[in-house]
Image: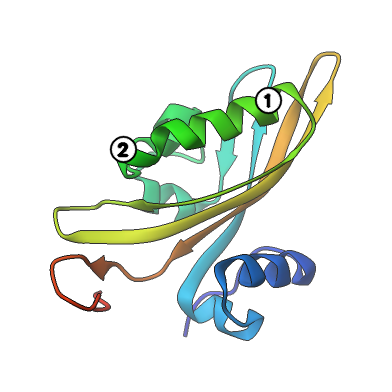
Amino acid sequence: MASKSTISPAQRSSVADFIGIKADQLDDMFVCESWSADLATGIVWIGPQTAAFHGVAGQTCGILDIIQPYDPADWHKILLALEEAATVATDISFGTSIRPMAGLYRPVFCFGHSEITATGGAIVGTFATARRCLETTSTMPALLN
């Protein structure tokens, strides 16, 4: 049985809507964990499963550690979204994929909002990472793992 998400029912519903699935399918298809970033220090806190999927040793890291395993074609748009969130209070969302090896990808969705204060502020949100990798070499993607 899939482990349960660590996010609220309202967050679950929003995440499922963004991904395009029903909320009751979310736990079977995605690992959903909360994350936050301190804008004054640049330190990011992520859940343990999110850290494992991203190849991060601990639950604290930097933004560049998070985006390193993503498809390089998406780095620019992700950094722009995070830069905007670090300078003005806004909502943030992006979709990308982790490329664990050639021919495979694992979809990742990130959601959040930023709050700006005189001393920095924070971004808080949710990572939704697919439980299974998809294959890119066949005509139709096939579920793996």
Sequence-first tag of 1 and 2? 2
Vertical comparison of 50 with 123: above or below: below
Out of 85 and 12, give the one closest to the viewer: 85
Q: Is residue 84 left or right of residue 103?
A: right
Residue at left offset 33%, top offset 51%: 98
Residue located farthest toward the front when viewing the structure as drawn: 139
Residue at left offset 77%, top offset 26%: 88
Pointer 1: what residue? 86
- Secondary structure of the residue carrying tag 2 is helix
- Secondary structure of the residue carrying tag 1 is helix
Q: Is residue 80 left or right of residue 56?
A: right
Mark on residue 72? Answer: 2
Out of 140 and 48, give the one closest to the viewer: 140
Picture coordinates of residue 31 (x, y %)? Answer: 51, 66
Give the amino acid type for the residue marked by disc 1 in the picture.
Ala
Picture coordinates of residue 30 (x, y %)? Answer: 49, 70
Residue 33 seen in this snapshot: yes
Vertical comparison of 141 with 76: above or below: below
Give the amino acid type for the residue marked by disc 2 in the picture.
Pro
Mark on residue 103? Answer: none
Picture coordinates of residue 55 (x, y %)? Answer: 34, 44
